[in-house]
Amino acid sequence: MSSAARPPLPPFTFETAVQKVRMAEDAWNSRDPERVSLAYTVDSTWRNRSEFLQGREAIVAFLTRKWAKEQDYRLIKEIWAWHDNRIAVRFAYEWHDESGQWFRAYGNENWEFDEYGLMRKRIASINDLAIAEPERKFHWPQGRRPDEHAGLSALGLKRCGVALRGVLWVTHACHLLDMREKLVDAHTVIEGERQSIHFR
């Protein structure tokens, strides 16, 4: 195993995919750009909202700008689906700007990993919802979310997504929720390959 490996390694099981998601959540809640960047390949490519990045230096610069703007940031991630070396995630995070206006950001990510467990591709779509301070749901002290703190499903935050033609496509379109619910715990056979995408 490479000294740079970041277990768990692909191909992922449900248990190792969940572990990978929690590790990413913990790293991002540290708000340490250098720490976060080490989970990605040196040439990792990102699309974050409408911004395109490549490489760890660009990731560090991006995260430094992000957390200067997004104050009192707290994040929860939850697994959506997994297959081989790919994981799909939904997440939400709360933050406020310099004026004190709070927001809850809702997002979906598609991740692809190399053989050493480093993420080589990250595609993230995110929408911000302005909220009043009493509407906040994430109240733990900044840093790692405590194990006893509720996750997204337990908090009742809506989830949206769908898989089409054996390729993971994650969207913000909530009208697709009913379609996704019918696929829970099902296996979709990829055309011609008889491989399965697993849904939680």
Image: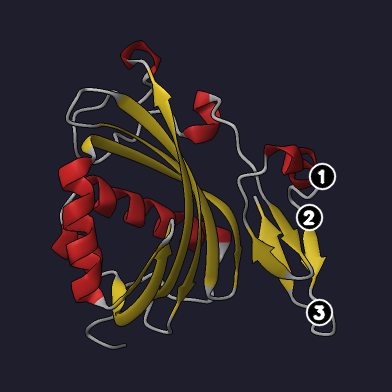
Q: Amino acid at mark 1?
A: Lys
| Quadrant of residue 197 within the rendered picture | bottom right
Q: Which residue is mark 3?
A: 194
Q: Secondary structure at mark 1?
A: loop
| Residue sitting at x 19%, y 65% | 60
Q: Position of residue 111 (x, y in %)?
A: 48, 67
Q: Quadrant of residue 159?
A: top right
Secondary element at tag 3: loop
Tell me where residue 36 appears, x and y as whole percent.
23, 61
Labels 2, 1: front one: 1
Quarter the N terminus occupies: bottom left
State the image coordinates of residue 110 (x, y, percent, origin top left): 52, 63
Please report whichever mark, 2 or 3, sits nearer to the chain's N-terminal start.
2
Q: Give the amino acid at mark 2.
A: Ala
Is the Cβ of the residue at disc 1 closer than 8 Å to that at disc 3? no
Residue at the top extreme, as displayed: 134
Whether residue 12 is visible here, answered yes or no, is no
Q: Is residue 47 above or below residue 55?
A: above
Q: Residues within 10 Å of mark 3 (few under 14, many from 20)?
A: few
Disc 2 + disc 1, Cβ < 8 Å: yes
> What residue do we see at 75% from left, 70% from top?
166
Q: Residue at x 56, y 65 (%)?
A: 13
Residue 17 shown left or right of residue 181 in the figure: left
| 199 relative position to 88: left or right | right
Residue sitting at x 19%, y 34%:
142
> Compared with residue 177, is residue 47 higher up or lower down, i.e. above or below?
below
Q: Quadrant of residue 59?
A: bottom left
Q: Position of residue 172 (x, y in %)?
A: 61, 45
Instruction: From this view, report whether residue 168 is shown above or below residue 151.
Output: below
Q: Which residue matches tag 1?
A: 182
Task: Using a 10 Å C-alpha cutoff, classify the residue at mark 1 as few (fewer than 14 neighbours), some (14 to 19) or many (20 or more).
Answer: few
